[in-house]
Amino acid sequence: ASSSSSSSSSSSSSSTSSATKDDAAVAAFLSNLHRILTALQDSSRGVQLKTRTCLFKSYANCFVARDAVSWLCELDSCDRDTAVDLFRKLSDMGFIQHVLEEDKLFADDHLFYVFTRKALRFAPDHDEVLRRCARLLQRMLDPVTGVEVKDRRYMLKSYRECFVAQEAVQWLSRMDQCSPAAALD
């Protein structure tokens, strides 16, 4: 009877030990994931986000999967298969998605991906970006120096209180003293 109770207590002890190891592994994985996701979105050292075109269609603020895999291999000194596995986990967890097919399997290829709203919470400069956007919007909507907002007609359809995108790009390039192409990015 004593050997049965000792084996039962040792199996209970080993299951507790494996649960603790599993918890530690999950915690380590999540910590690594957070570190990578934050670095990935860092504008100075992460993947390059920009408007990209494929088959005459443009996709804003996206990155190329192959470039992201190369970036992660360099950051973590890992092989490409390991990097692809991590990006697949990021996709499965809803942090990144293909620009057209939300459930597309991540592949080390010339495919365009974007960060989801969920991922943006991990962006290192998220709050600063929001503040800059708010200031820019405030300047843009200024009735004296901003873009002209008014009711407009286009192709026999009426639009209330709107502005023309081309005028907004020109305004932005004047205000920030940059080219119209840079204003679009």
Image: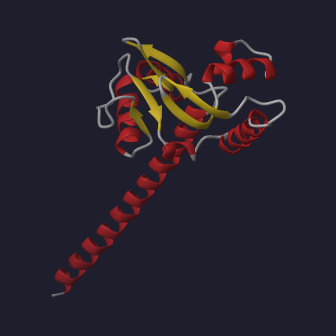
Tell me: residue 95, above or below residue 65: below
Residue ID at (69%, 45%):
127
Residues 164 and 48: in front is 164
Q: Is residue 20 above or below residue 139?
A: below
In the rendered view, does 69 fall on the left or right side of 127?
Answer: left
Where is residue 81 shown, x and y percent of the image? 34, 26
Q: How many marks?
A: 0
Q: Residue at x 79, y 35 (%)?
A: 139
- What quarter of the picture does the C terminus occupy? top right
Give the residue drawn at x 55%, y 28%. Answer: 153
Q: How is the image coloured?
A: secondary structure
Residue 40 % position (x, y): 55, 32
Q: Residue 115 in the image: state x and y as whole percent.
A: 49, 36
Residue occupying the point 51% across, 25% down: 60
- Taking the image as drawn, is residue 157 in sight? yes
Left or right relative to 48: residue 29? left
Image quadrant containing the N terminus? bottom left
Outermost residue to the bottom? 1
Q: Compared to 65, does 160 lie above or below?
A: below
Q: Is residue 185 visible?
A: no
Which x, y percent locates residue 29? 45, 47
Q: Residue pushed farthest right? A: 144
Camera-nearest residue between 114 and 150: 150
Q: Relative to 98, is 152 on the left or the right?
A: right
Q: Quadrant of residue 54?
A: top left
Q: Quadrant of residue 131?
A: top right
Is 155 placed above or below 21 here? above
